[in-house]
Amino acid sequence: MIFLSTFIVILWLYLFQSSFSGGRVLSAWHGWLARRLRGVLLFAVAVVLPVMLLLLLLGWLYHSVSVVVLLLIYVPVLWLCLGAGDMDRLLNRYVEAADRQDNIAAREWVDAMQLDKRAGSDTDQTEAGWSQLHQQALEATGYMVLQRYFAVLFWFFVTGPAGALAYRLADIHKRAVQQGGANAPAFASLVYCLEWPVSRLLGLSWALVGQFDTVMAVVKRDGFRRLPLAIFLGNVLAQASGPGAWLAAEDDRTPPATLVDHAIPQDERLLTGVLRNAVGQAGDLLSRTLLLWMCASALITLAI
């Protein structure tokens, strides 16, 4: 049931490549509640209550109605939780801006896509070169695909539609309270715990469909460091998509003890080209990763 539901929804997203996502429906509903409720009561009504009602509905359908009817619940819930299916178009917008050297449009794209603001670079954005901008684009892309697709799919595979809905609602609530809520750190930590195992599994998946040796070197070195997930995923994505360039910076991005792929490109133009190549290949890499997860899900379903 889980594999069939996932196949239907993913096929729909790929066929229609819509910029509209069901998550916007949940965000709008949460915003409506946020204007009327506050604090713990908002969390209880916006996150806990829908998950509990869904669990009760699934339990009743499973024991009282045909199991096939569950498909009518699994598919819309997964569609509501997944992001839009226009990843290729989003990446192409950045690539086109980079190719015409429009750093203003490229920086605006990065700012709009950076869902995890903790991962933003401390460097002055106006002084950032193309290599830094490409690295930030990889970080934004890595975290965006985790938040849009793979975290939802992971919890859907592991715990069913209730787990996928719980993650999506918790993520929406986290981003809402980050605007000044007193409990923002607690919710950020909760979502971080939900996303951490997915980010590591995603890193291993990118190793299997990309540059295995260089990706695994990054995963082994950074896998158990408390890095912002966007930085971890951006570093892995750079290695998986390109020929192994590493962008070392200050603060969290300290130079590795053993350089990945033997050396950091010292020439700015070379480094910029490598990271630009990584951004351009990211869409194909993500499609192969999604196919890998679908095949793994099918095998597990057959084994069970």
Image (tube, rainbow, N blue to C red):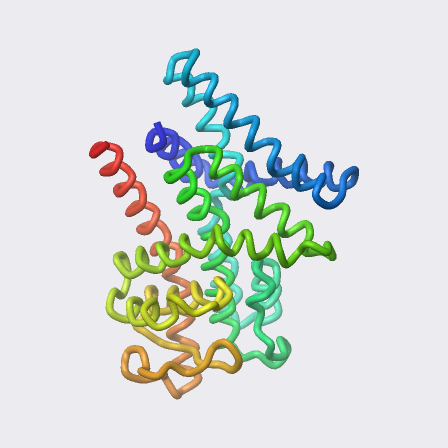
Say whether residue 158 is left or right of residue 111.
Answer: left
Q: Residue furthest bottom?
A: 266
Residue 228 as seen in the image, left or right of residue 112 = left
Residue 168 lies, with reference to residue 97, above or below; the image says above
- The residue positioned 68% from the left and 56% from the top of the image is 178
Name the spot of residue 242 as percent of width and height, x first: 33, 69
**Image coords of residue 52 (percent x, y):** 56, 30
Q: Is residue 295 above or below residue 124?
A: above
State the residue in front, 96 or 94. Answer: 94
126 is higher (above) or lower (below) than 187: below
Residue 80, image x and y in percent? 53, 35
Q: Residue at x 34, y 64 (%)?
A: 241
In which quadrant is the C terminus drawn? top left
Q: Quick check: 229 above or below 172? A: below
Q: In this rendering, would 102 be left or right of 89? A: right
| Along the line of sight, the residue nearer the viewer: 182 or 116 | 182
Q: Which image quadrant is residue 295 in?
A: top left
Task: Name the residue at 30% across, 45% down.
Answer: 291
- Quarter in which the N terminus is drawn: top left
Residue at left offset 47%, top offset 77%:
253
302 with respect to 107 (left or right):
left
> Residue 109, how many percent across, how many down?
58, 61
